[in-house]
Image (cartoon, rainbow, N blue to C red):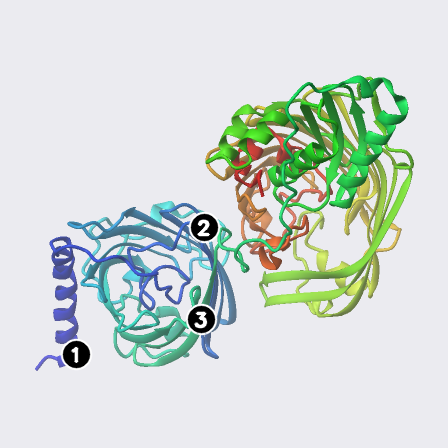
């Protein structure tokens, strides 16, 4: 007599395969609710994926597990159809040889076809495609709404998702993989080996609750071999609760053995914590009275000086740092730095309003030259009559953009008067800092919190002495114990020593910087001193970036010497000459690409490709990968350098305008190959914000 359970599982697998054809022929689809995130932080059921996607630009952080198994996943909806994830996991025992195992992995999930009236949604995905292989697997999945509250999912899985109840290997055997090293694309494995069906149902009795049941094709083979898991049944059951939009709390029973709890927080750069703005309303545009506009005031030197001072005073009262003003009968030019508004068009629009409020009626042409670090970046020309005409016009911001002029910033011209007493100038500030180490191989998070004393001494436009001193108050960065085993020069992998031996007080940086322009489209930077925590030296850069072009080209050359571990003023005996040629391209929508080719800190040669998605409010989410002439085996764990960059503007949280941001870089593991010098104020990031393409993306804020 055959066992009943295997017979029942065989029938269920047949039912799942048949259900795929049923989903394709189901009736009209209901509106899709907010997607449920599975234990892997991706659209899905419990462990299994679904053919859904998060809202475009959603950023989610998901936690799930118990004492033996934990998964922490950061996911981002890169495009309306493509989701990317980075996961940090803990497994108490993955096969008998690996206990206390920490794993890092990357996933991609692509929605090939959205659900329509006649067809289900269709998605394809690869899990752990460039990690160690512990979670490696691929899938094709269908999802369909059956009415307004019930959703059905059915699919086929390979790799880990084909490890239970397989129905054969239709595309050939799966090549073996070196589990543990990670960092290589094992494309020859994809959709190879045993394939197994999976599926499930999600029922939503209300907007806040979901009840989920799934048939899982994951056999948890490594966990079973490690003795921490008992795979009793392929059935999983769970419940999800949504206390508020963007929050999920869930509890699941997996395979009749494991009970795990977790949650997810979903943020979106386009949905700030505080809707709207707490900034005061801008000044109203004051229309000029009709009639002739006398320009005789321009021959009165005292009147000109008075008008100039009045404009400087009103601009500085609103948070602008004015460098110079030029006035004549029909034109005014002002060079200034925006230290308040995170939307550059908003800053320009408010400057134009203040000029209209302050200047004599004969001044028709406003020339606004934004500057950063003393560099004039562009010249935005606005006619006063356009301000008066379009302030309350429907779609007035669009017409204001069409009528504005965008040109290369001119060099200092005749009649341009610097604000007296502007240089030299000393400024300082005392604030808090936080230093994070995320997802290292031994601990998911370490952090230090303390005070940072920062000072700047502006000698002249574009010439500044800067320094920062940090005092640690509390933290555990110095408790890391994982020492470098790199066979390359330890240019980054000894970073732990700077936390362990650096004490509670250290010099973060101490530099002299000189910025300049050598032509309408050419910018220069020279930085000398203690450049960053680990290196001092000299760095030089030249950037070509026309105001109206999407392309920028740059060259950078550095001489760097490694600093002492105590973060004082001494140096170690390692030095290196590095440099890169760079190309920057504004691709499409919010995306920019960057490629850097050159020599890295360990003396290796190669290239770095970076893709960033930047939002109008200052949010940035990006990823990078570096390949050099260092072989993967020589590089060590991870095979090559890669990571995720995240920048969050303070204004997104506070609801008030601010130029402050919080940024971090998440790397699976820090090694020495492909390591680059970290220099403050690289030119492209400074220059591009006030060029035409960046301004056009945010011009809707011009009237705010």
Q: Mark 3 points at which residue?
A: 263
Residue for point 78% across, 19% down? 328
Query: Is residue 282 or residue 117 the one in the foreground?
Result: 282
Residue for point 71% across, 48% down? 491
Q: Mark 2 points at which residue?
A: 57
Distance, label 3 to label 2, CA atoms, is: 19 Å
Q: Can residue 120 be seen in this view?
A: yes
Residue for point 84% across, 25% down? 304
Along the polypeptide, which appears first: circle 3 or circle 2? 2
Quarter containing the C terminus: top right
Q: Quadrant of residue 373?
A: top right
Point out residue 233 in the picture as x, y percentages from the top left corner: 25, 77
- Tell which tag, 3 or 2, sits nearer the viewer: 2
Q: Name the residue under label 1.
A: 5
| Image vertical order of residue 318 relative to residue 164, above or below | above
For mark 3, give the secondary structure: strand
Q: Is residue 3 visible?
A: no
Along the polypeptide, which appears first: circle 1 or circle 2? 1
């Amino acid at each position: 007599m055959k066992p009943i359970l295997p017979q029942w599982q065989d029938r269920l697998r047949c039912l799942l395969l048949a259900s795929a054809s049923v989903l394709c022929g189901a009736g009209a689809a209901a509106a899709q609710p907010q997607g449920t995130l599975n234990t892997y932080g991706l659209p899905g059921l419990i462990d299994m994926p679904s053919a859904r996607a998060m809202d475009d630009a959603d950023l989610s952080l998901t936690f799930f597990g118990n004492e033996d198994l934990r998964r922490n996943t950061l996911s981002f909806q890169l495009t309306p159809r493509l989701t990317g994830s980075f996961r940090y996991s803990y497994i108490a025992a993955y096969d008998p040889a690996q206990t206390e195992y920490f794993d890092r992995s990357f996933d991609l999930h692509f929605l090939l076809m959205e659900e329509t009236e006649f067809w289900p949604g269709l998605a394809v995905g690869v899990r752990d495609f460039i990690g160690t292989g512990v979670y490696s697997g691929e899938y094709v999945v269908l999802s369909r709404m059956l009415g307004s509250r019930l959703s059905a999912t059915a699919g086929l899985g390979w790799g880990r998702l084909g490890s239970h109840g397989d129905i054969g290997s239709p595309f050939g055997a799966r090549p073996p993989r070196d589990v543990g090293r990670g960092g290589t694309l094992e494309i020859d494995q994809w959709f190879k080996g045993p394939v197994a069906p999976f599926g499930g149902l999600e029922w939503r009795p209300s907007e806040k609750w979901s009840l989920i049941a799934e048939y899982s094709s994951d056999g948890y083979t490594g966990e079973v071999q490690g003795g921490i898991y008992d795979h009793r049944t392929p059935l999983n059951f769970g419940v999800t609760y949504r206390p508020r939009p963007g929050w999920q709390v869930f509890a699941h029973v997996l395979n009749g053995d494991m009970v795990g709890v977790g949650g997810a927080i979903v943020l979106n750069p386009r949905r700030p914590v505080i809707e709207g703005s707490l900034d005061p309303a801008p000044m109203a545009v004051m229309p000029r009275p009709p009639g002739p506009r006398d320009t005789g005031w321009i021959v009165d030197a005292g009147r000109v000086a008075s008008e100039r001072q009045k404009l400087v005073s009103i601009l500085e009262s609103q948070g602008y740092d004015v460098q110079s003003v030029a006035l004549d009968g029909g034109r005014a030019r002002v060079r200034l730095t925006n230290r308040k508004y995170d939307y550059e068009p908003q800053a320009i629009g408010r400057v134009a309003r203040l000029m209209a409020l302050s200047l004599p009626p004969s001044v028709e042409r406003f020339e606004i030259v934004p500057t950063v670090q003393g560099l004039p970046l562009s010249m935005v020309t606005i006619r006063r009559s356009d301000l008066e005409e379009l302030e309350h016009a429907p779609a007035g911001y669009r017409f204001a953009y069409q009528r504005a002029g965008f040109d290369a910033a001119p060099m200092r011209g005749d009649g341009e008067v610097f604000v007296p007493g502007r240089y030299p100038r000393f400024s300082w500030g005392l604030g808090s800092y936080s230093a994070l180490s995320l997802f290292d191989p031994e601990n998911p998070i370490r952090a230090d919190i303390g005070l940072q004393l920062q000072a700047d001494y502006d000698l002249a436009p574009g010439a500044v002495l800067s320094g920062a001193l940090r005092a640690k108050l509390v933290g555990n960065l110095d408790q890391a114990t994982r020492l470098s085993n790199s066979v390359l020069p330890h240019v980054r992998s000894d970073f732990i020593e700077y936390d362990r031996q650096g004490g509670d007080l250290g010099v973060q940086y101490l530099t002299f910087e000189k910025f300049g322009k050598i032509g309408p489209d050419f910018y220069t930077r020279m930085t000398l001193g203690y450049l960053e925590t680990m290196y001092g030296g000299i760095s030089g850069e030249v950037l070509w970036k026309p105001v109206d072009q999407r392309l920028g080209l740059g060259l950078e050359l550095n001489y760097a010497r490694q600093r002492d571990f105590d973060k004082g003023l001494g140096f170690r005996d390692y030095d290196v000459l590095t440099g890169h040629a760079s190309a920057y391209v504004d691709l499409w929508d919010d995306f920019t690409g960057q490629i850097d080719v050159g020599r890295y800190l360990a003396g290796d040669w190669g290239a770095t490709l970076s893709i960033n998605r930047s939002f109008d409010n200052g949010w940035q989410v990006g990823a990078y990968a570096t390949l050099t002439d260092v072989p993967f085996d020589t590089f060590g764990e991870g095979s090559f350098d890669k990571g995720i960059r995240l920048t969050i503007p303070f204004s997104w949280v506070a609801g008030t305008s601010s130029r402050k941001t919080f940024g971090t870089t998440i790397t699976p593991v820090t090694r020495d190959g492909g390591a680059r010098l970290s220099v403050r104020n690289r030119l492209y990031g400074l220059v591009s914000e006030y060029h035409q393409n960046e301004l056009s993306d945010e011009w809707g804020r011009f009237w705010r």
